[in-house]
Image (spheres, rainbow, N blue to C red):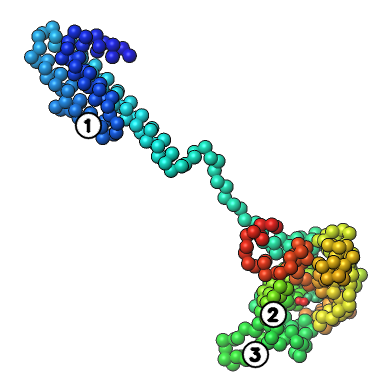
C-alpha cells in the first residue's frame, strides 16, 4: 500500500511522529468491539485527539518541516479511517456468523413445504358416483335439507301410518307460529328422494337427474348408523322407460364403480315410492362371491335401492302415468365408501383423524 510506505518513509527519521504513528496503529489493532472502535475514533481523530495534536504542532515547527508534518498528519488520518472501517466490517460479519450459529439456523436447508389438503373420502366417492351419471347424460339437481313432510313422505306415496314418519325415526322442526305448534310438517329430510318430486314438479320429461346430498335420521349411532349421512339419488322419467332400462343403467354404473368383473343381482324389495321395487347387490369384490368376512359369507354386498317410479308419485306431480314412466334409485355414500375400502365403522369418517383421512 503506497500510503503506508510513504508514511513509514516520512516518519523513519522523526522519532516522535513515529511513536505517535505506532500508538495510533496499535489502538486500531486492539479494537475488539464496536464500542472500542468508537472510543478509538475519539482518541485518534477527535478534537483533542492524536491527529489534531500533530496538526497543532505544525505552528511551532521549523519552516521546512511544516509541509512534511502536514503530509504525515493527512496520511495517518486516512490510514486510521480505513483501518477502523475495515475492523468494523469484520466485526459485523463475525457477529452475524456467531448469531446464526447460536440460533442454529441452517441457511442451506431447503424451504419447508406447506401441506396441501385434499378432498374427504366421502366427497371423492360422491364425485365419482356423480361423474359416472354425468357421463350417461344425467344432470345434477339438489334440494333443501329442511324439507316439508309433503315432499319427504306424502308425495312419495308414503302413507301417514308408515313407520318412517314416527317421531323415533324423523327429526321434526317446531314451527314458531303457535297455531301450527304441533304440526309435524317441517322436518330434516330422511332421504334425498324428495328431490325427485321437486324436480318433476318444476320441469317436464325427459328427465335424467342425479342428486347428491345430506339426509338425517334419528338412528341410534353405531358402526353403521349416523344421524347425518350422505345419499346419492338418481331418477329418469321419459316415454317408454321400463325395468330393462333400470337394470342396464345400474349394471353399467356398478361395473364402472367397482370393476368390470362384478356381477349385479336384483332382489325384490318394497319402497312406497316405487313399484316394483328392488335392492341391488354387487358380487363381493373381496372374495369374488365365494363368501368371506366382508360379505358375511353371502358372496353379495347390498349397494342400493331402486324401482320403477310408482304411478301415484307421477300423479302427484301432474304427470300422466300412461304417457310417462320412470325409474329411480338411491344409495348411501358412506356405505359405498365402506364397501370399497373395507372400512368397518363409519364413525372414523367424521372423527377427523388425519392418519386415517390421509390414506385416501
Ligand atoms: N330413499 C331410499 C332410502 O333412503 C332409497 C331409495 C330406494 C331411493 C329406492 C330410491 C328408490 O329412489 O327408488 O332408503
State yes or no: Cβ of the residue under disc 3 lies below 8 Å from any atom of ligand 1.
no
Tag 2–tag 3 contact (CB < 8 Å): no
Q: Which residue is mark 3?
A: 183
Q: Earlier in the sequence, mark 2 or mark 3?
A: 3
Q: Which residue is mark 2?
A: 219
> Would you say 10 lies left or right of 229 here?
left
Q: Earlier in the sequence, mark 2 or mark 1?
A: 1
Q: Earlier in the sequence, mark 3 or mark 1?
A: 1
Categorize mark 3 by other alpha carbons within 10 Å: few (<14), some (14-19), many (20+).
Answer: few
Instruction: Tell me the element at label 3.
Output: loop
Instruction: Tell me the element at label 1.
Output: helix
> Would you say 169 lies left or right of 253 here?
left
Q: CA distance from mark 2 to mark 1?
A: 83 Å
Q: Comparing marks 3 and 1, which lies closer to the viewer?
A: 1
Q: CA distance from mark 3 to mark 1?
A: 92 Å
Residue 7 in the image: x percent, y percent? 24, 13
Q: Which quadrant of the figure contains the N terminus?
A: top left
Q: Comparing marks 2 and 1, which lies closer to the viewer?
A: 1
Query: 98 or 167: which is nearer to us?
Result: 98
Q: Residue at x 28, y 24 (%)?
A: 29
Instruction: Tell me the element at label 2.
Output: loop
Q: Comparing marks 2 and 3, which lies closer to the viewer?
A: 2
Kindly indicate the quadrant of the structure image that contains residue 226.
Answer: bottom right
- Taking the image in four quarters, ligand 1 sits in the one at bottom right
Q: Residue at x 35, y 33 (%)?
A: 92
Q: Is residue 158 above or below residue 24?
A: below
Q: Which residue is mark 1?
A: 39
Amino acid at each position: 500500500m503506497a500510503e503506508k510506505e510513504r508514511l513509514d518513509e516520512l516518519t523513519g527519521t522523526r522519532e516522535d511522529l513515529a511513536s505517535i504513528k505506532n500508538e495510533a496503529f496499535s489502538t486500531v489493532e486492539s479494537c475488539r468491539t464496536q464500542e472500542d472502535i468508537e472510543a478509538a475514533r475519539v482518541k485518534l481523530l477527535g478534537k483533542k485527539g492524536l491527529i489534531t495534536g500533530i496538526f497543532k504542532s505544525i505552528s511551532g515547527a521549523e519552516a521546512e518541516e511544516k509541509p512534511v508534518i502536514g503530509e504525515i498528519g493527512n496520511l495517518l488520518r486516512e490510514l486510521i479511517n480505513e483501518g477502523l472501517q475495515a475492523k468494523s466490517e469484520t466485526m459485523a460479519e463475525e457477529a452475524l456468523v456467531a448469531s446464526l450459529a447460536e440460533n442454529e439456523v441452517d441457511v442451506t436447508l431447503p424451504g419447508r413445504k406447506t401441506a396441501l389438503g385434499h378432498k374427504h373420502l366421502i366427497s371423492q366417492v360422491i364425485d365419482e358416483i356423480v361423474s359416472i351419471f354425468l357421463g350417461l347424460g344425467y344432470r345434477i339437481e339438489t334440494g333443501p335439507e329442511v324439507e316439508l313432510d309433503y315432499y319427504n313422505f306424502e308425495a312419495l306415496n308414503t302413507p301417514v301410518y308408515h313407520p318412517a314418519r314416527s317421531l323415533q325415526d324423523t327429526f321434526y322442526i317446531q314451527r314458531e307460529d303457535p297455531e301450527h305448534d304441533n304440526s309435524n310438517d317441517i322436518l330434516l329430510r330422511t332421504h334425498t328422494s324428495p328431490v325427485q318430486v321437486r324436480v318433476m314438479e318444476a320441469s317436464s320429461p325427459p328427465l335424467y337427474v342425479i342428486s347428491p346430498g345430506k339426509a338425517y335420521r334419528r338412528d341410534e349411532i353405531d358402526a353403521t348408523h349416523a344421524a347425518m349421512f350422505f345419499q346419492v339419488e338418481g331418477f329418469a322419467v321419459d316415454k317408454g322407460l321400463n325395468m330393462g332400462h333400470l337394470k342396464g343403467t345400474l349394471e353399467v354404473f356398478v361395473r364402472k364403480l367397482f370393476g368390470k368383473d362384478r356381477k349385479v343381482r336384483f332382489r325384490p324389495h318394497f319402497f312406497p315410492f316405487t313399484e316394483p321395487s328392488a335392492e341391488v347387490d354387487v358380487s363381493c369384490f373381496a372374495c369374488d362371491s365365494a363368501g368371506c368376512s366382508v360379505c358375511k359369507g353371502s358372496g353379495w354386498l347390498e349397494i342400493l335401492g331402486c324401482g320403477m317410479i310408482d304411478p301415484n308419485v307421477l300423479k302427484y306431480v301432474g304427470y300422466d302415468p300412461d304417457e310417462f314412466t320412470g325409474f329411480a334409485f338411491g344409495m348411501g355414500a358412506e356405505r359405498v365408501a365402506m364397501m370399497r375400502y373395507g372400512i368397518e365403522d363409519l364413525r372414523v369418517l367424521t372423527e377427523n383423524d388425519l392418519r386415517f383421512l390421509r390414506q385416501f
